[in-house]
Amino acid sequence: MDAHTSELLHENTRRFLAQPKRLLIGGAWVEASDGATLDVFDPATGLAFAKVPAGGQADIDRAVAAARQAFEGGDWAAMRPVDRERLLMKLADLVEANAQELAELEALDNGKPVTVARFADVALVVDSLRYMAGWATKLGGETMQPSVPIIREREFWGFTRREPVGVVGAIIPWNFPLLMAAWKMGPALASGCTMVLKPAEETPLSALRLAELVQEAGYPAGVFNVVTGLGHVAGAALSSHPGIDKLAFTGSTEIGKLVGKAALDNMTRISLELGGKSPMIVLDDADVDAVAAGAAHGIFFNSGQVCTAGSRLFVHKKKFDQVVEGLSNIAAGMKVGAGLDPDTQLGPLVSAVQQERVMGYIRSGFEEGARAAVGGEAGEGGGYFVKPTVLVDARDDMRVVREEIFGPVVVAMPYDDLDEVARRANDTPYGLAASIWSNDLTRVHRLIPRIKAGTVWVNCHTVLDNSMPFGGFKQSGIGREMGRAVFDQYTEIKSVLMAL
């Protein structure tokens, strides 16, 4: 890390980066069993600036054993719901108190603008933990008056219990490292589960800092464990581990299928939040300026590295040229730079691999006949930059239209009527999210049921609230994050029938 970068960091961030990194297993900070390490790279420069342990099968075994011991005995197993609530609230307070440090770690690790990390990612983490904390005291069952028609001479009483599923394995992606960790740990810990967290190999630092805050909050040893390492080693070991009761994964559909198959051998409960190719549908009455600004946020937020990124922009032919012009002007004026630069609007992609993947899609689009209204190039310097790109003259059968790019690239296409756009919007194996832009509520309400997606936004895109379930249709996943619905993934329902 150069001197200029170091000067931009909070004193606490510099202190954290300077200390050796360890795995958190059973309340102790330990090295990987074989001593192996991984380099951590700054996407803005392409240079390594930290090392973390490269955990393997033995480390996953140790972490799962620690989580099992904490779940089945000791202070955590005996803890009342109100005490779990208070611990999560305390953790949220600690995250809030260390928000700048956590935001800087995300900016260094992921490349995202530090201002976005501070006021979006970290703020959402705090809200998520507090929201989930409140559910700890509100998870309950139901009472029934059973009929038992084949035994009419007896009277029966029935009720259900909602119990924690057990030891949770969580595998999180590199696009929102801290937030995805919170989405998993909040409901898991609120419901009384214990956890082994495996962060993405590209972005491990905020998970390790979060683990320090978990300890500071006073969680018993083994309740929360973190094993950094490679996905095909530590992640695969966690996915297939027989000691895991529930596996929560966020990532690509391709990897999610492998994770799900590995978990199935042990009948591990799974939730998979996977990829998307989300349409933004602009009706002919929509305000052009509002659409251009909204579409820019929908695709360029987090450099397009968002599962719900609005990468297919369907605009009614009456407004198509105006919307493309407005969106292109916004893209051309965006400040592309390092995440720690307070003026940066679009940071680098997370890795050289991701940069080449995105540029490969852009080249594919050009080869198949699309053209760039703006962008279409890699950025300057040694980092993993791609300029914000708007592609036009595309067909529905092109790879840039069919496949998830996961970068700052949107394909804008005109359409004639609602029947056509509904069909084209659904012509994808994904079904995570969509947005509709119009003030004609009659047409909006008629279109919403026709869109096969887990979330439909109206006149906004990628706006999340902790009270609303989040997840996908089709190959965009299984299960839901957030809201009351998430606890179906972290609890088992036990039926109790009593003969009186």
Image (spheres, grey):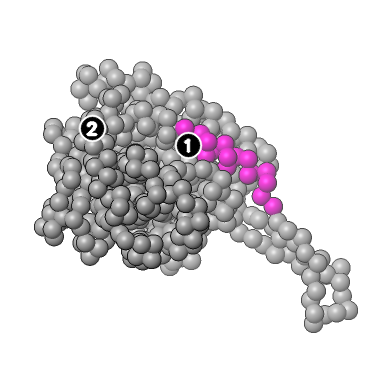
Q: What is the spatial separation of the Cα atoms under label 2 and label 1, in whole angstroms?
A: 30 Å
Neighbor class of circle 1 (other Cα within 10 Å; few <14, some 14-19, many 20+) is many
Q: Residue furthest left?
A: 367
Which amino acid type is marked by label 1?
Val
* Disc number lying in front (2 or 1): 2
* Rendering coords of residue 21 (x, y %): 34, 33
Note whether residue 57 is visible: no
The residue depicted at 45 percent of the width and 25 percent of the height is 98
Residue 392 left/right relative to 438: left
Q: Quadrant of the N terminus?
A: top left
Residue holding disc 2: 333
Which amino acid type is marked by label 2?
Gly
Note whether residue 142 is visible: yes
Q: Quadrant of the C terminus?
A: bottom right
Q: Quadrant of residue 413?
A: bottom left
Element at badge 1?
helix
Residue holding disc 1: 125
The residue depicted at 73 percent of the width and 58 percent of the height is 142
The residue depicted at 57 percent of the width and 42 percent of the height is 132
Please give the range of residues in magenta.
123-140
Magenta span: chief secondary structure: helix
* Rendering coords of residue 401 (x, y %): 25, 58
Residue 309 left/right relative to 361: right
Front residue (pair 353, 337): 337
Element at badge 2?
loop
